[in-house]
Image (spheres, rainbow, N blue to C red):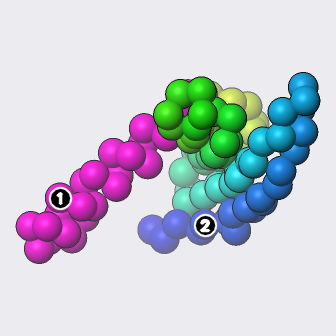
């Protein structure tokens, strides 16, 4: 069964909030697989203010929806950990000469 990946929306902007100018980059991604009863939507972003405050400017959530009712089933406070884990696995498998 083949995934149908919806086109991600990506935006970059600078904003002034509470007197502070912040660079913000965000993206939205969603995917569906025909015949499955759920679909995920990921909202993630990077902020210069968060990077300055915490050392890691990445943040995000994944919401898993019911394909029939579109009701949210699960909300995952990702904080970029899934991407970090995927990158680590990719680096290890690349180093070993295998594919992820």
State which quadrant residue 76 falls in: top right
User: Total marks drawn?
Assistant: 2
Give the label on residue 50, or none. Answer: none
Looking at this view, name the residue that lies furthest to the left: 96
75 and 23: which one is in front?
23
Q: Left of 84 or right of it: where is 40?
A: right
Question: Which residue is denoted by mark 1 in the rendering?
Answer: 92
Mark 1 and mark 2: span between their CA atoms? 26 Å
Residue at position x 35%, y 52% from top? 86
Q: Which residue appears farthest toward the bottom when viewing the image? A: 97
Q: On the rendered image, what quadrant is the C terminus found in? A: bottom left
**Residue at (60, 34) in percent of width and height:** 52
Instruction: Tell me, yes or no, whether the highlighted magenta stretch contains residue 56.
Output: no
Q: Which residue is mark 2?
A: 5
Residue 87 location (% of width, % of height) = 34, 55
Say if residue 61 shows up in the picture.
no
* Residue 31, percent from left and from top: 60, 58
Q: Secondary structure at mark 2?
A: strand
Which quadrant is home to the N terminus?
A: bottom left
Seen in the picture, residue 22 relative to 50 is either above or below; the reply is: below
Residue at screen point 73% across, 61% down: 10
Magenta residues: mostly which secondary structure? helix
Kindly state the secondary structure of the residue where label 1 is placed.
helix
Span shown in magenta: 76-100
Is 99 left or right of 3, judged from the image as shown?
left
């Amino acid at each position: 069964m083949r995934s149908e990946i919806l086109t991600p929306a990506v935006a970059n902007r600078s904003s002034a909030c509470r007197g502070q100018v912040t660079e913000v980059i965000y993206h939205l991604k969603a995917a569906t697989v025909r015949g499955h009863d759920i679909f995920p939507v990921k909202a993630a972003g990077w902020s210069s203010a968060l990077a300055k405050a915490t050392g890691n400017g990445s943040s995000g959530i994944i919401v898993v929806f019911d394909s029939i009712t579109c009701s949210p089933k699960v909300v995952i406070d990702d904080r970029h950990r899934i991407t970090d884990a995927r990158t680590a696995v990719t680096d290890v498998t690349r180093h070993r000469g295998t594919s992820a």
